[in-house]
Image (cartoon, rainbow, N blue to C red):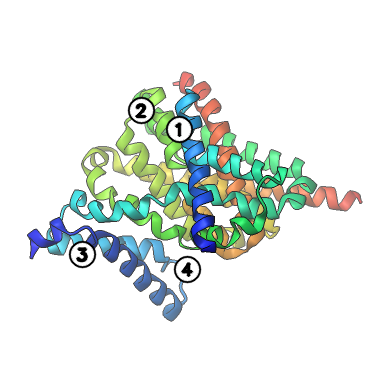
Amino acid sequence: MKYLRQFGIILFISFLGEALRMIIPLPIPASVYGLVLMLLALCSGILKLEQVKDTADFLIEIMPVMFIPAAVGLLDSWSSLQPIWVPVLIITVLTTVIVMAVTGRVTQFIIRKGEKKK
Amino acid sequence: MKEFLVDSVFFGAFISLAAYEAGLLLKRKLKLPILNPLLIGTILVVLVLVLLNVEYEHYNEGARYISYLLTPATVCLAVPLYQQLTLLKKNAKAVAAGILAGVLTSLVSVFLLAKLFGLTHEQYVTLLPKSITTAIGLGVSQELGGIETITVAVIIITGILGNVIAESLCKIFRIQEPVAKGLAIGTASHAIGTAKAMELGQVEGAMSSLAIAVAGLLTVVGASVFAGFM
């Protein structure tokens, strides 16, 4: 019954996330509110790690599969994408590469600068 | 045959899992980073749908039960994050600066490239939230008057691209610190990239999860400012 209870807790926090999304008029999804709530529950000790860990690990492990339906959905948006697909694709590829490189280098630079000081 | 597939509730969910499994198998056999199970799985499902002449809407009858798990799974990203909390506190300054730099880079580079290609205001705001998770990005696009279907498409393409290139890109740019790798992947390619960060390691996964939330929230604010520039 361990998994059932863990999944129940995770669904309950997701539900609370949904409730917050209803109340707060910002374009923030239930999942992000839920993530913050889960983190707060763990940090405050209301929830023990063992009460969610196994099911959480399983859900995270299978997460990539959950993106397949949305990715297949690109089939349907092709008609609206088609007239501007060349600039859109170039912008998408370039910005993704630049953002990843900049974020990584900036973080690494500050971490290593801090380590040298010590 | 076709009518049966159209009515089936399990067809969409089953072929999604089978296609992903086939992608995993290919990756294990050939060991090429481009053979990403998510990418291969998506292509295989598309091929099956086209060959059997099944529309997306009917495929999604079953597949949506897989997407249903996405919110609970994202909530669970708090678990690895919690386990790395001491590491996060130790590197708080680097983490904050890294994500902020990434979000600003994203907005500035979209702005400059949109100018370069002469995009309209509508197309420009459509692309502004491209690096953040679908649910937040969609809301931002709606708010700013973008084209929602294109925003979703671009966010997903960004995610898959980030997932596929993450390992090689970190090598090329010599990003070696696990914290830096995780933040880079999460800030550039949200939850789909995070799936890759989880494979690289606990720290990478946790930092990438953190970046989804923080970069997403910063972009909500940043995009509304940048929308006024063009």
Q: Which chain carries label 3?
A: B
On screen, residue B176 versus residue B49, left or right, reads right
Quadrant of the image occupied by residue A92: top left
- Please identify, in this view, whether the residue under mark 3 or under mark 1 is nearer the observer: 3
- Image spot of residue B125 (x, y percent): 41, 28
Mark 1 or mark 2, which is nearer the start of the sequence? 1
Q: How far apart are marks 4 and 3 (CA)?
A: 23 Å
SS for callout 1? loop
Lower position in the chain sequence, tag 2 or tag 4: 4
Q: Residue at x 34, y 43 (%)?
A: B153
Q: Tell me the CA gap for discs 4 and 1.
A: 28 Å
- Circles 3 and 1 in contact, beta carbons < 8 Å: no
Q: Please report whichever mark, 3 or 1, sits nearer to the chain's N-terminal start.
A: 3
Q: Quadrant of the C terminus of chain B?
A: top left
Residue at the spot of label 1 = B128
Chain of the residue displaying label 1: B
Badge 2 is on which residue? B146
Query: Which numbered mark, 4 or 3, is in the foreground of this view?
Result: 3
Residue at image mark 4: B33
Which residue: 35% across, 28% down?
B146
Amino acid type of the residue tagged 2 in the rendering:
Gly
Instruction: Check the image and report above or below for A12 versus B110.
Output: below
Query: Tag 1 or tag 4, which sits nearer the N-term?
Result: 4
Q: In what element is the residue under mark 4?
A: loop
| CA neighbours of label 1 inside 10 A, class few (<14), some (14 to 19), many (20+) | many
Q: Which sits in the foreground, A88 or B68?
A: B68
Q: State yes or no: discs 2 and 1 in contact (Cβ < 8 Å).
A: yes
Secondary structure beneath label 3: helix
* Residue name at image x 60 percent, y 40 percent: A37
Q: Separation of disc 2 and disc 1 at Cα? A: 9 Å
